[in-house]
Amino acid sequence: LTPQRTSNRVTSSIMTPVFAIGLPLMALIISTFAIERNIVCYYGTWATYRNGAGRFAVEHIDPFLCTHLIYAFVGIHQNGTISILDPWLDLEDNWGLGTMRKFNDLKLVNPRLKTLVAVGGWNEGSQKFSTVAQSPALRLRFAKDAAKFCERMGFDGLDVDWEYPGQRDGDPSVDRENFVELLSDLKQEFSNRGMLLTAAVAAAENSAAISYNISGISTHLDFINLMAYDLHGPWESVTGHNSPLFAGLNDKTEVQRQLNVHASVSYWLRQGAPAEKLNLGVAFYGRSFTLRNVGDNGIGAPAGGPGHAGPYTYESGFLGYNEICEKLQFEKWNHCWDNEQQVPYAYSANQWVGYDDSESVTLKANFIKRYGLAGSMVWSIETDDFHGKCGEKFALLSTLNKGLEHDEVTTTTTNEPTTISTSTHHPESTSTTEEGTTSIWTSTSTTTEEAGPIKCFETGYFRDPEDCSKFYFCEGATLHSFQCPAGLYFDLSILSCNYPERVEC
C-alpha cells in the first residue's frame, strides 16, 4: 500500500469570496478555515470470492483514499443481537480468513482512518428490524449488543442499513417512528462509548417519505449516508439512469422528477436533515438493460429486461465500473453523455448501461460543495477500476478525492456593530467539454441591495432574463451579480456557466 497523503481528511485550498457592505477597511477581519469533507467507502466483502481481476480482498484497499471505511454486512437476529453472516470470511475461528480483523488493522497503516460495520443491507430484509424496533426491551438489547460487538472487533461505530422501515416486509403503521426510537437507544449506548452511529437511507422522496421522520432520525445520527442511486433500473420498461444528477426531459410526472440527486438532496434538506450530516451516495456501478430495438438506444428507450451479467460481478442488470470501463476500452461500446441529467451512458448492440464516470463524479463533488454537504459516500470500492486497467488505479475514488479537495470558507468579523452580507457559496463551477475535460471558471461579481429591475424574493440562483451570460445569487434582500466568462451562458440545470449549445436560453 502506497500512502497518497499524510492525512486522509479532504481539506481545501481555494478561498470563497465574502461580500461585505459598509465595513471600514480597518475594522474588517477575515479568517479562513478548511472544510473537511467525508469520503465514506463501503466495502462489499463478498468481492473476496470473485474470480480473476474482479477479486477484491482487504489487501486491495488503499486506506488513504477514504476517511471512513464501512464493512458490509452483519445481520440482526429477531432477539436483538448481531448476526455474523459469513463466519469463515469474517472471523478467524476454525481457520477462517479473519477479514474483520484485517479490515480494522488498516488503521495501523492510517491512524486517522475510522472503520464502521454496517448491519442490514438489502438481503437482510426489513422484518427483523421491524420486530426489534417495536420492543423497548429488544431495542435496548440490540443497542448494547451492537456496541459491545463493535468494541470487541475493533470498529469505531455502527452503520444502520435497514432497507426499509415501513416497506417490504416491515410494518408501515409503526416502523417510521420506531426507527427514531431505535436510533435514540443506539445513540445513547454508542455515545457513552465514544463511537459513531450512522445510517444508510433511501434518497428519493417517494420512498423516504414512507420510511423516515427525517428531522427525528437526524438528531441521533453522526452522519447520514444518502443512497442516491438505483433510482432507475431494469425493473422498469424503459432505460433510465442509475443516478442522474438532475431531472431529464423524459421525466414528466411528479414521481419521475423526484428520481435524481438534486431532487433527493433538496427533499432531505427541506425535511430537516442538516447539510453538515448528509453524505451524498456516489455509485461505482451502473444499471444495465437489454434493448428491445437496437436502433433506439437513448435514455427512455424501450427495454426488455436486465442487461447481461459482467465477468466479475455475475449479476444481470448490474455492471461494476471496472466492468464498464473495460467494455469501453476493449470492446465496441459507444459512450454518450446526457446534457440534461449530467451523466453518461453506453450501449453496444442490444446492451445498455447508465453509470457514473470521472466526469459525472466531478460534477457530483461540485454539487456536494455547492450545497455544503458533509461529503460523499461510495457504494462500493470493490467495483472501482482498482487495478487501473483503464487508466489510473481507483479512478473514480481518486477523482472524488480531487474534486472535494478545493473548498474553503472565509468568515468575516468586525470590531464594531455593522451590516454584513456574506456568501459561502463557491464562485466556481464547471463546464464540461465534449472531450470530457473540466474547466473551472471564476465569475466577476458585484453586490447591492438596490437591485434595479432584478428583485430578490427568495434565496437562490437566477439568470438574467435578457442576458444569458449574467446571473444572480439572492441572499435575503441582497443581490450578488455575476458575469460568466466570455462566450459562456449560465446553465440553470447545473447552476454553472456552460457552452451556449448546451444551454437552453
Image: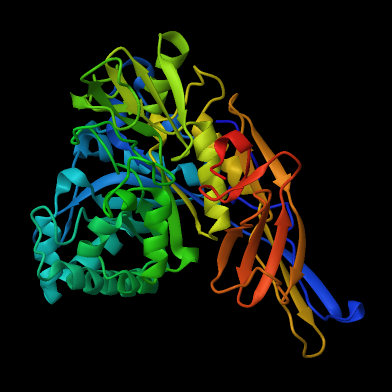
The reply, left or right, for residue 315 in relation to residue 391 is left
Residue 359 occupies quadrant: top right
Above or below: residue 218 compared with residue 8? below
In the foreground, 465 or 298: 465
Q: Nearer the viewer, residue 143 or 333?
A: 333
Left or right for 146, reference 40: left
Q: How many marks?
A: 0
Q: Quadrant of residue 171?
A: bottom left
Q: Is 122 placed above or below 209 here?
A: above
Could you tell me which residue is drawn at 74 percent across and 67 percent down? Answer: 18
The residue lying at 70 percent from left, 66 percent from top is 480
Q: Return the x and y of residue 372 as percentages of the image width and height.
A: 55, 61
Give percent across and percent down for residue 17.
74, 62
Question: Which residue sits furthest right?
Answer: 26
Is the image coloured rainbow, by chain, by secondary structure, or in one colour? rainbow
Q: Is residue 223 above or below residue 501?
A: below
Image quarter (top left, top right, bottom left or bottom right) of the N terminus: top right
Residue 452 picture location, percent across and down: 71, 72
When the figure is inspected, residue 253 is found, relative to residue 87, above or below; the finding is below
User: In the rendering, at what x and y percent does residue 402 appear?
Assistant: 61, 40
Question: Is the C terminus in the top left, top right, bottom left or bottom right quadrant?
Answer: top right
Q: Can see residue 3?
A: no
Q: Nearer the viewer, residue 485 or 20?
A: 485
Closer-to-camera residue (95/143): 143
Residue 150 figure quarter: bottom left
Q: Is residue 168 left or right of residue 293?
A: left
Q: Is residue 381 visible?
A: yes
Residue beneath the point at 33% across and 38% down: 242
- Residue occupying image coordinates x 54% and y 50%: 492
